[in-house]
Image (cartoon, grey):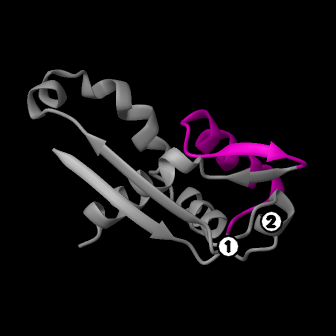
Amino acid sequence: MLFTGSVRLPTEERYEWQFGAFTERLLDDDWAETADSFAALGHPVRLRLLREILGGRRTAAELAELPETGTTGQIYHHLRQLTAAGWLHTTGRGRYEVPAARVVPLLVAFTAAHP
């Protein structure tokens, strides 16, 4: 199986990515090891935060201004969960970003899940 992608975000950042794996290896792997990563994506507010961060909002303060994302404490809780699962990392001064190696896989997951 081969995934490849080239992405240009609204922030003008560009990412190119390619990953390949043999089907046998994928079927032999313990899928339970990925449960935390998928679980972190299982909340509408976390998905919104990821979308906003990819779109250019990078600080917790900017994210807290968004409607329907909860209190500042709730936002930090979601950011911690996304960071722990590897979907985000901090770049200092309260700024967050999706690691470059996760941008295309994240968008592939959304594409695959979209009806």
**Quarter that holds the N terminus:** top left
Residue on which disc 1 sits: 68
Check if residue 58 falls in the magenta segment.
no
Could you tell me which residue is drawn at 81 percent across and 73 percent down? 65
Which numbered tag is attached to residue 53?
none
Could you tell me which residue is drawn at 51 percent across and 60 percent down? 15
Residue on which disc 2 sits: 64
Q: Camera-side residue: 46 or 9?
A: 9
Q: Camera-side residue: 22 or 68?
A: 22
In this picture, which residue range is highlighted in magenta? 69-93
Is 82 placed left or right of 28 in the picture?
right
Q: Is residue 103 above or below residue 27?
A: below
Determine whether the residue tagged by mark 2 lies in a helix, strand or loop.
Answer: helix
Q: Position of residue 36 (x, y in %)?
A: 45, 33
* Label 2 crowd bin: few (<14), some (14–19), many (20+), radius 10 Å: some
Amino acid found under the numbered disc labelled 1: Glu
* Label 1 crowd bin: few (<14), some (14–19), many (20+), radius 10 Å: few
Amino acid found under the numbered disc labelled 2: Ala
Q: Camera-side residue: 96 or 9?
A: 9
Q: Position of residue 14 (x, y in %)?
A: 55, 66
